[in-house]
Image: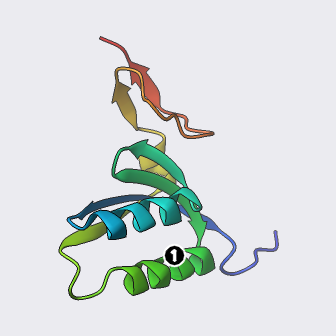
Amino acid sequence: MCRIIGMEKMTYLISYDIEEDRTRTKLSKLLQGYGVRIQYSVFECSLTDARFQKLYGEILKLTTEKCAGSVRFYPLCKNCMEKIMTIGKPLHEPENLNSSIIVI
């Protein structure tokens, strides 16, 4: 099987806590172009390495040293993705998510 290096996708859970409204809004709009909003400031993005590097660079430009807050990236392996559980009904359900949904 032939594999093109850099074309394999990794899923990232990206969360942010940004104090400034303008920067927070720009970051939210940027992330909407790369993934699915899971919660207000949390996105799930399935990205190739090249796409991840592009997004990371764009976020670096957007969030300067003067920016109060942080952006966190959590890589999720395929095995972890299959074990995702949700309690309640998600407001934004990602496509192709093979998670267990537990409704209480």
Q: How is the image coloured?
A: rainbow
Left or right side of 95 for 23:
left
Q: Residues within 10 Å of mark 1 (few under 14, many from 20)?
A: some
State the residue at coordinates (51%, 75%): 55
Query: In this picture, is 18 found above or below 43?
Result: below
> Residue farthest to the top?
104
Q: Position of residue 87 (x, y in %)?
A: 32, 23
Q: Which amino acid type corresponds to the residue marked 1 in the rendered image? A: Leu
Q: Secondary structure at mark 1?
A: helix
State the residue at coordinates (23%, 79%): 67
User: Mark 1 = which residue?
Assistant: 55
Q: In this view of the protein, can residue 11 be seen by the observer?
A: no
Q: Position of residue 74 (x, y in %)?
A: 35, 62
Q: Position of residue 49 (x, y in %)?
A: 57, 77
Q: In this view of the protein, can residue 8 be seen by the observer?
A: yes
> Residue farthest to the front?
22
State the residue at coordinates (43%, 59%): 28
Residue 10, quarter of picture: bottom right
Query: In this picture, is 101 found above or below 29?
Result: above
Q: Between 53 and 25, which is closer to the camera in this rendering?
A: 25
Q: Between 40 and 53, which is closer to the camera in this rendering?
A: 40
How many numbered discs? 1
State the residue at coordinates (37%, 31%): 85
Residue 96, quarter of picture: top right
Left or right side of 9 for 30:
left
Q: Quadrant of the N terminus?
A: bottom right
Q: Quadrant of the C terminus?
A: top left
